[in-house]
Amino acid sequence: MESILVDERTKERKVSDDGNMQKCKNQFGTCISYGQNVEDTVADVYFKQFYENMLSGTSDPTGLLRLYLDEWMKTRNKPKLVLDLDHTLINSTQDLSRDEMHLLNTVSTTKDAGLLHRIHFEDCSMLVKLRPFVREFLYETNKMFDLYVYTMGTRDYATKIVELLDPENKYFISKSKVISREDCKQSGVKALDIVPGSKAYIVILDDKPSVWTEEDRINVLQILRYNFFASSFPSSYSWFKSPAQMRIDEKEADGTLALILSVLKRAYGRFLNDYKQPGFQPDFRRILKDMRSEILKGCVVAFAGVPSSLCHGRMPLWQVAEKLGAKYSKLGDASVTHVFAVQCSTEIGQWAHQNGKFLVHPNWLETAWDLWFRPPEEQFMLLPLYCISAVLPAPTPSLTAVAVPTLANGFH
């Protein structure tokens, strides 16, 4: 009868069907065939060194044993943060536009410095742009979470990117913490079944929830997509200048990753509070849902001339508003606090202005969803014709509204 055994010294899972021990083929720490997790934690590494030194008698293992016990105490109940790579922590390209060639003068020559790097493969090379604040982000999140990388890129690609993100091998010391497309059970679909531990203890950071199984999307903390190079934008955006072309980038201290870090800290704080409650099971899925629903709590929204087909991602805007905690009502209701419009007629503008309502572009709603906070309405206000006629020397027939652009994405 076939059985699964564990070599206690090496922590390798082996399969026995005839009394002989055979090493499981998967080198990334998870036995795909049997659905068993055999990850090497930092504590495991210390224990291996301690055990081998004790057997050989080459050194006093006391220090290693203490490290093992300390690490085991820190990580036994540590939740996990599963990190996407492309458009979440980095942006990469094989092709630079003519306006981006200036970047070649800023490529870093060492892995531990700078944000722009070149990685080489057998048949090509790529430029990799690290998202601003990414190393500080990893340092801070590692205090709260056990970090994993999960990418649909190849194993070779994932390994090279992780070497840039973690040049001192502090966070992804075990191979099982780097998951690539070769480890996926379903082609083109990410799933948490190959990440060890309870799903209630896992947060996923990804710019694209749709790549995950429907069951696991509730674990996703969606982050604003990071596009730096022109090649990352659709061909229909040929008129659009990329941040690289404009020589700008996200800010460090209050950019997207810094904002997401604050969300994770709040979620982790709630997780710890729940953990301390007797008989109460902490669950990041519930915590994230609750935090999301508090962002626009107290807002009552109405839509004026906004197409019902208008979505954020795949979600209708009215549903976005509800998940953010806002209530939906009809235009003209006295309880309405925000009116959303793409263009505003004089009647809509007059009603909103006379009744003290915010008249904003739907981008305000989308930004609240992406950045996990209520952005200032002033950055998204629509000004109707009757409001701006006093400041314009002459009315412009084609002008129906003025939308104030936002810098909420943290560019500089």
Image: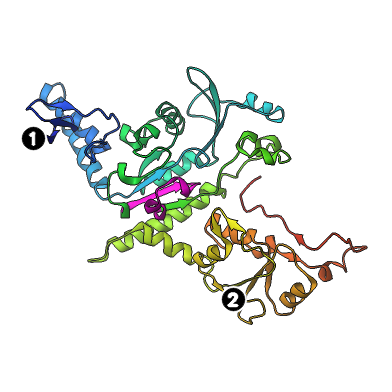
Three-letter code for the amino acid on which mark 1 is drawn: Met
> Within 10 Å of the Cα at label 1, are there few (<14), some (14-19), or many (20+) other Cα atoms?
few
Of tags 1 and 2, the one toward the viewer is 1
The answer to which of marks 1 and 2 sits earlier in the sequence is: 1
Q: Residue at x 79, y 68 (%)?
A: 384
Q: Residue at x 27, y 34 (%)?
A: 29
Three-letter code for the amino acid on which mark 2 is drawn: Ser
Instruction: Report whether residue 34 is seen.
Output: yes
- In the foreground, 182 or 280: 182
- In the foreground, 114 or 248: 248
Quarter of the image where one finds residue 54: top left
**Furthest-right residue in this view:** 394
Disc 2, SS: loop
Q: Are marks 1 and 2 in contact (CB under 8 Å)?
A: no
Q: Is residue 83 left or right of residue 274?
A: right
Whether residue 283 is situated above or below residue 301 in the rendered picture: above
Query: How many labels, in total?
Result: 2
Instruction: Give how far across and how far down residue 8 sits, in percent.
Output: 13, 33
Residue 313 magenta-drawn?
A: no
Disc 1, SS: loop
**Magenta stretch, residue numbers:** 201-219
Disc number for residue 1: 1
Q: Which residue is mark 2?
A: 329
Instruction: Give how far across and how far down residue 13 sits, in percent.
Output: 18, 33
